[in-house]
Image: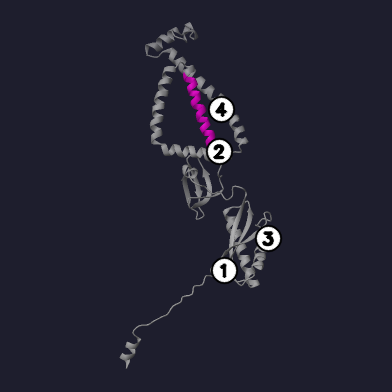
Amino acid sequence: MSGPLGFFVPAALGPVEESLEAVGIDLETIASVGIFIAVAVIAYLVGRAIVGPLFNRVANARELDAHARRPLKKLLNFLIFFAAISVAFGAAGFGNFLRSLATIAAAATLAIGFALQDVIKNFVAGIFIFTDRPFRIGDWIEWDGNSGIVEDISLRVSRVRTFDNELLTVPNSHLTDTVVKNPVANGRLRLKVDFGIGYDDDIEQATEIIVEEAEKHEGIMDEPAPSVRLVELGDSSVGLQSRIWIESPTRADFVKTRGEYVQTVKERFDAEGINIPYPNRTIGGDLQIQGIDDLATQSD
């Protein structure tokens, strides 16, 4: 046996080599394939053993959620596998083949890249969502006139359940190229609730009622304290705006707290004789009916 692997082959294998060569199989090729497989397996296992714990430490340092770790770990394992295959090609002496494969892969990648621009764009946007964390699973978000609860985040799309129980599958690039409102990102939410009272009503009394009812509600925070501002002198009412805070809000908490609060203020206004006016319109002018004299003449 000639070649770089010849010294590995015992003399006793001479007849076996001759038999393999007779059917067109080179023993050196078999040895190279064995080396390729062994190096690929060892490189992959060593890569996972080294890179895996390192990834876990980085993920823990950045406090990545479980839903973010799974797709990133799959991508990392694929890169380790690709690197192991590349190392195995070199170790087995398939350098020329590896270069040819790299050229073909580069051309294929360029062609696929043009064909899958949107997919790649969404993939990159998904990585930014995982790293920047503008929202998480379970958050209530709003964007481009849409709103809902995030149910799943993958590397290509995110799935959002609307409050009408519709499931929206949103390309990740749409959520990174536009303004996304996350009302619950900071753990508490300020609500603005407008009330209108009559011009003859006592503004100070109405303000005290609005603040007292906010302080009584269990879902409204004491700090920051509720506040009330006069914000409008309307056509038929004086506008008062209450500003309250709720802690760890969800969409359900937001709707429930706001509804209960408005109801208790309305009941107190009714009990204290404070009027909540509604818009009035006065129509002026003369009403003329033509043809009355003609009708009277005909009746005569």
Q: Name the residue under label 4.
A: 48
Q: Name the residue under label 2.
A: 131
Badge 2 amino acid:
Thr
- Residue at position x 39%, y 29% from top? 108
Q: Relative to 62, is 25 on the left or the right? A: left
Circle 2: is it few (<14), some (14-19), or many (20+) Cα within 10 Å?
some
Question: Can you give x and y, in whole percent of width and height, for residue 157 in the image?
Answer: 48, 42
Farthest-out residue, top: 11
Q: Residues under labels 3 and 2: Cα distance?
A: 39 Å
Question: Can you give x and y, in whole percent of width and height, for residue 91 in the image?
Answer: 49, 17
Q: Mark 3 points at which residue?
A: 215
Mark closer to the chain start, 2 or 4: 4
Q: Which image quadrant: the N terminus?
A: top left
Element type at mark 4: helix
Label 2 or label 1, whichever lies nearer to me, is 1
- Residue at position x 56%, y 24% from top? 46
Mark closer to the chain start, 3 or 4: 4
